[in-house]
Image: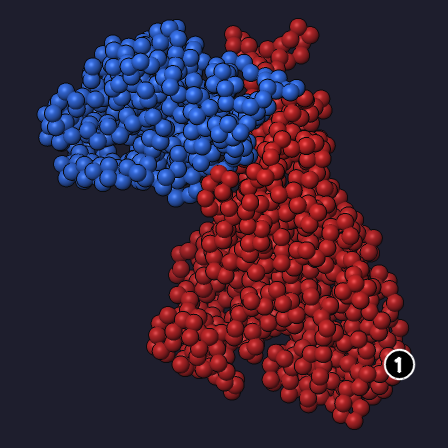
Amino acid sequence: MAEAIAPKTEQKLVTLTIDDRTVSVAPGTWVVDAAKQAGIDIPVFCYHPKMEPVGMCRMCLVEIGRPMVDRATGQPALNEDGTPKIQFGAKLETGCTIPVSEGLVVRGYTDKVKEERDQVLEFLLTSHPLDCPICDKGGECPLQNLTMHFGPGESRYIYDEKIRLDKHVPLGELIFLDRERCIQCARCTRFQTEVVDDPVIGFSERGRALEIVTFSEPGFDSYWSGNTTDICPVGALTTADFRFEARPWELKPVASICTHCPVNCNTTLNTRREAKAGGRQVVKRVMPRQNEWVNEIWICDKGRFAYHYTESSNRIVQPLLRKGGQLTPVGWDEALAAVADKVKKAGGKLVTVAGGRLSNEDYFNIKKLSEKAIGPALLYSQMAGGDLVAQVGLGAGSNLGDLGAGSAILVIASDLEEEAPLWWLRVRQAAERGATLIVANPRRTKLDRSAKYALRYDYGQEAAVLHAMLDSFSPKRPDHPESLRKLLRDDALKAAAQELSQVESLVVFYGSEGTDLAASQALANAAANLLIATGHVGKPNNGLVAIWDKGNAQGAWDLGLRPSENLAAQMEEAAVLYIVGADPASDDPALAAAVDGAQFVVVQELALTKTAQAADVVLPAQAFTEREGSYTSGERRVQRFYPAVPAIEGMRADFAITAQIATALGLNLEQRIGSLAFLQLAAANEAYKDLDFGKLAEVTEQWPIIGRADVYYGGTTYDNTQGLGVKLSSEADRGQSPVLSFAPLQEPAAKDGLVAVPVSRLYDRGNTILPSKLLSARLEAPQVILNPEDAESLGLEMGKPAKMTLNGVTSTVTVHIDNSLPKDAALIPRSLGLAISGPTPVKVAA
Amino acid sequence: MNEILLRHREINNLDQLPIYRQNKGFETFKRAVTGMKPEEVTEIVKASGLRGRGGAGFPTGIKWSFMDKNNWPHYVVTNADESEPGTFKDREIMESNPFQFLEGVMLCAYAVGANAAYIYLRGEFWDLAAELDKHIEYLEREGLLGDKLFGSEYGLRLYTHLGAGAYICGEETALLESLEGKLGQPRLRPPFPPSFGLYGKPTVVNNVETLANVPLIVERGAAWYRGFGTEKSPGTKVFSLSGNVEKPGNYELPLGTTFRELIFTHGGGIPTGRKVKAIMPAGASSSLIVADDKALDTPMDYESVPSVGAQLGSASIIVIDDSVSMDWLINKTVHFFQHESCGKCTPCREGTYWMRHLTERIHQGGANWNDVILLNEVATNIKGKCLCALGDFATEAVTSSIARFKGDFEGKTQAAPVKMEAKVSS
């Protein structure tokens, strides 16, 4: 069942009258929002329901009357007929800045108000270029819509006196500004400042010369810039991806889910058939789709701009079979027969390695195939704890949007904005609503700005930090090593622990900053223990969240896949190595060697990756845009995605290919329809029980009301009509008592020089980003990040190249310096071309 | 008379600290800090009936008493942005009677419990700010500013801050934004500065002249102050007289003095051979008063000026004689407001720009009567729709001159209206 966003009924509602309709709303609601709730659209430009009002466009002026009070008695003054006397002000008032009050009378459609709207629109249009026929916003533009509703039919302004301003101003390489179209509503600048804390754009000059400028280098340096084009009420801000590409009315909207990170933002893919794609239906842009439980109305720029890999020219369009040493195009029957032959003979040595971006249906079939073949089903990941998340993860009914005063959030071992941007946003907002935010990380991250406690520790101590927190209020284990006892003397840590033990709701996010698989396991255990010991499991808005490196890693865990501690060895020993949606050979030379060492390698992929090039059989899979399926987010919300473009002839869905391979072992898995595969997995998994694609497609009314092309303009974010998904229950929700699982803490090994530690970056050089040319300028070069002391003693300078030797491989990297880093740590961002799976000794020299 | 604000014209070298102190300077401040409760200072100012001299005429003591006592720290901000065309009173006070002004700031700070006070000056007053900085340093050396003043627990620091050349920063909330280092645009009100001001803290924003009254009010008492001016507008006022008069300048006179007395008795009248035609009593923001006998005999106080269709405002009296045509005049004022509109509100940003095109065309003789009607409508459509008063101010001279000096425009337009009828009213 989709949860309804119910108005918070604990508080007393305020009743007012708007255009003769009586409406009761929460105190503090602005008049324009109260009207919207009553079904009355008061037009707005600068007001946006996700931001504080500024009252500057003057579009929402309405007549507001207030009940009069009899001065003598202090009682409400009444008319002769007993109705309250209402006094209207001489001036109209901005509905976006007036909070509701009891007995208020609002008139939104009187002649006086309509005349005013006509006048404000006439003012706006005096300096508007009226270039709708070539404007990207045309068709979904509130200035157009409001002019049609309320505006003057003709202009009294002399066209030749129109102001002429620059029309193609790049604020960065992603966003363009048309200064003539800008109506100075400040939605974009306020969004960047208030909502995402990246105040990199602002106003310069004044009056009609007022102009949006960027203060950053590179321009408009923010992971959120695309959202400003959604909320821009005119065509002033457009994306480099979509500008002059298509008209909104030509586009078909299809619901989808972003797979770049575990948030699983709801998106709408806009597609159209076009000549330059050979008449094919192609994705023209990715837009946010409202889901107030997940991404509200926002998506990050990676989600918006890094979708081109699905249409990359590098896609494999036909199965390939190695013949005479060469990968040769063959038909499906021949390729599958070759695989079946080997799988039948594998005898327990079928090793399956799956990436973290497949659908639940794919994982279900992979797990079934592996079980039948008695071989391991491995998740290609360096993070652990998905089983613990299933036990004590966020309870059913959770919504990060509900966290506020009385809640605490602990984020450990993560640079959250880099790893899961929307969670960063939601956590920041919770902190602004009064939640206690504790950020524990060896170095400073952007989330620290919102934190009440920013705790530092040395890389490798992440689990110890949580043990220390637990011990600080329940000292049960005197056998801890000295390093942990040292942490216990940290007053901030103790205060943070004290606070989180006492709150109503506690959510713990753990990431993978500086951890390998073993460290991740220890961290996840410690985090689960902290939650269990403080009673923060098995209820809404409490529990554990893993900040996975891939979009559906939690789904993989839920369906039985597990990462491997000795992946290279397991791969190398395989009789049949079946790799699905993963490219280990590109990531690590050791894994490349393991692929080469396996007897027979089957790779199921979109593109001819380095791993695929080493395969014996390559099976072309459909991209998520070409098929249906479901994903499970890090919060354990199961959501559907839909086919947006027709599948290219020759490619098949991953679950279908796996099912076809499984027939070799006499196993009958669903190989046609995703929804049927989902029914099978639901029947086999307690948490997914009773779910089907119909339930995942249920929607409910969401507030604010966005995306219905009405005059109360929330932006081009799509209304959610295709499904809000279902939040799974945890085992603790279902009454299973979670068990504390203490692993003894090891004293960290004595340090001997620099240790390379992996961290994550949003814009890495992974296979899903590289094909998006737009982002190429934002992708960083291979680099090492050092603290200033270490850099100085090694004779290294910021921005200069250095020679780095890691795992026996020497490469040239760029030096970055971060003064919040602990000594002896050399940060290596993952997937920038340097192989790193965990803390590793490293040599860096000038 | 230069009884209160322009005392330096009577007392030589009053801008020297020793001379100011010989004239009882800072005794009142010391007495207040050592012997009076802050509320007592506020009460005296309240009782004096002193009203804000920045233009709005809001009772000063009442403003001080609005400070939110549950939210600290409190700040005092002096509005020394003096940007209204025709206004030059604060400059003379700060230049020539600076210590009385500073003592006023200090008394205000003590009254509202502020330990820091800022003096926000327009950017062109950079030399004046440098002088004030020297004075402030001097006062610190003399132990009149700093921590634990006169052995009490009270401490106070003063700071000057220069604007960057925007008229709008004379609007108190835009001033606060600018002082915080942000773009100078007005804030939504409410909340008003006494509850949410500088850095979101309770703040009193007062004009220079307002505060310069305070030392003598506290020294000599409310009753003494009420001996000047009218019942509802007590005290004296510095009238900045400019325009077509023989002796322009600042004149300190009791509120309630008539226009006639200011212009003819003190200002030396109109240049020979010409006649007074109109008066703008509040600088460029003003409506144009037809300078007939009724208007000339109107007392200049906050209550009386509206009876002739204008506001007293900052009392920057611009006199206009019969050599001036109103199309020229409003072209000047509209250019000014178009240049100074901050751009926040649509009607002001777009409307002043539109009006500028119209007034320019009318003044150049390229317009017809429909343009005058349109100008009047554009002005009317701006009025009452903006967040701050700048939008309204930009229209005052326009609508009042079209209504009251219609002939000036008829002379400048080419053809009679075809169908449109001007909806003008005085």
Tell which chain the image draws in blue: B
Image coords of residue B220 (percent x, y): 20, 16
Quadrant in which residue A185 is drawn:
top right
Q: In this view, does A702 lie to the left or right of A821?
A: right
Q: Is mark 1 on a helix, strand or loop?
A: helix
Tell which chain the image draws in red: A
Residue at 19% across, 29% down: B96
Residue at 50% across, 23% down: B412
Q: Name the residue under label 1.
A: A333
Image coords of residue A552 (percent x, y): 69, 64
Residue at 67% across, 9% down: A82
Image coords of residue B191 (percent x, y): 47, 30
Can residue B220 be seen from the camera position used here?
Answer: yes
Can residue B317 be seen from the camera position used here?
Answer: no
Residue B154 versus residue A589: which sits nearer the camera?
Answer: A589
Q: In this view, does A846 lie to the left or right of A112?
A: left
B62 above or below B194?
Answer: above
Q: In this view, does B336 lie to the left or right of A606?
A: left
